[in-house]
Every structure is written in structure tokens, then in C-alpha cells.
Image (spheres, rainbow, N blue to C red):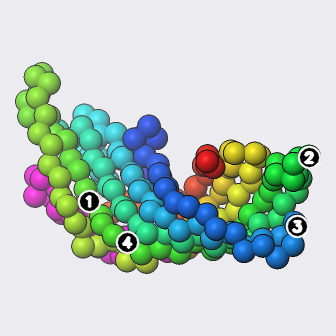
Amino acid sequence: MPDSVPLLSTGSGTTFIGFGYNLIFSSRLRLHFQPGIGFLRLTFDQQPQKKFPVAGDTTFILERFRLTYVQLPIQLAIILKRNEEAKVLTKIELGPVVGVLLNASQKFKQSLSGGIRRTLTLKYSFLPNPYRWFYGVQASFYYRWIGFFAFYRLSPLFKAGSQYENPRGEVLGYPRFSSFSLGFQIVL
């Protein structure tokens, strides 16, 4: 879709807040549970003469989907190195992530007149079309208190063939999102 609007990376991403619990098998092997809540934001940079998801003129300047999940990552952790006090310095983790949808919302910002910087913000509090269950596989590498992860989502975000109506009354299909994501974690 060369004329479609791009995903806005500065307004997109996932924030996860949770706590961890370890079931220790040995000094190098443990099962790590980390229940919490994840907030997924997908923001599109609307531009003149472009419309999500196909080409056309638009007055929209922002379109955002927000999905909130209760998540439970269950990962097998392998400790690679410890310091003198026996604290973990480096480790790798691999395992499934499952979750259930709490809420899904959509937000539009629309320019009300060409040259004037007035905007109208419309929010829809619950979307009926996201998949209720969230599942995938995650691999992580930690050094001290910072971690890097790769996640592959096995479930789609939205039901196949589902559509929504924007504020101008146009019926549009949901976009296809990448199933793969990269990121970092801070462990407190």
C-alpha cells in the first residue's frame, strides 16, 4: 500500500507493568512468571491526500488504536553469569505469553478547517472486533537491570474481515500489523 499512511513509531508501542516470581530448579535454571497489564498503542501519521488504509484525501491528522491486556509471560530462564554476591548478571529467557483483552479503543483527531489549527478529537471506548485472546512466544536477554526481547504474536489483533466506521461515515478494514516486535525492558 504505497499511498497508505505510515505507522508513527513515536506514538506506537507497548507498555507493560507487572511483577515477577521465580520457581527455582537449580542455580542456573528457573521458571519465571510475570503477570501484569500490557497497553498496546498503534498510531498512524495521517497526512494530506492520504487516508488509512488506502489513498484519498482526508482531514484526519491522527488515528490511534489502543488495546489493553492482562498478560502472563511464563518463561524458562537460564542464568549465564553471576557476580561475587551471587546476584544474576546475565540471563536468557524463552517461553509463551498469554493474555486476555480488557479494553480496546480508537481515537481520531480531525482538522476542522484547512489553514486554522483547530482539531476535533473523537474517542470510541470499546471496539467489538479485536480478538479476545492474545498469545505468542517471547525470547529475552538480560544484563543486570536491562533486558532486550523479541516477541512473535501467534494470534491476530483483529478478527479476519472485520471493519469499522470512521467519523466521516466511511467503512474501512482494519490494517494488517506485523506479528514480530522488538523492545527493551527495565527490571526494578
Tell which of 9 and 74 is nearer to you.
74
Q: Say which mark, if any, is on residue 65.
A: none
Q: Element at badge 4?
A: strand
- Residue at image mark 4: 101
Q: Residue 9 placed where, x, y %?
A: 46, 41
Residue found at the very far right of the displayed protein: 84
Q: Name, please, the residue furthest toward the left.
A: 113
Q: How many labels does the image show?
A: 4
Marks 1 and 3 sit apart, C-alpha to C-alpha, by 44 Å
Label 1: element kind: strand
Closer mark to the observer between disc 2 and disc 1: 2
Viewer-side label of 1, 3: 3
Can residue 134 be seen in this snapshot?
no
Quadrant of res 100: bottom left
Name the residue tied to disc 3.
27
Q: What residue type is labelled 3?
A: Ser
Find the magenta span and give its range.
155-172
| First along the sequence among labels 2 and 1 | 2
Identify the residue at horizontal 23%, vertical 50% (top origin).
107
Q: Which residue lies furthest to the front in this view?
A: 85
Badge 3: how crowded within 10 Å, few (<14), some, or many (20+)? few
For marks 1 and 3, the one nearer the N-term is: 3
Residue at numbered disc 2:
84
Kind of residue indicated by mark 4: Leu
- Quick one: SS at disc 3? loop
* Separation of marks 2 and 1 at Cα, in angstroms: 48 Å
- Can you give x and y, in whole percent of width and height, for residue 123 in the image? 17, 52
For marks 2 and 3, give the CA distance.
Answer: 14 Å
Q: Indicate left or right for 136 with 38 as reference.
A: right
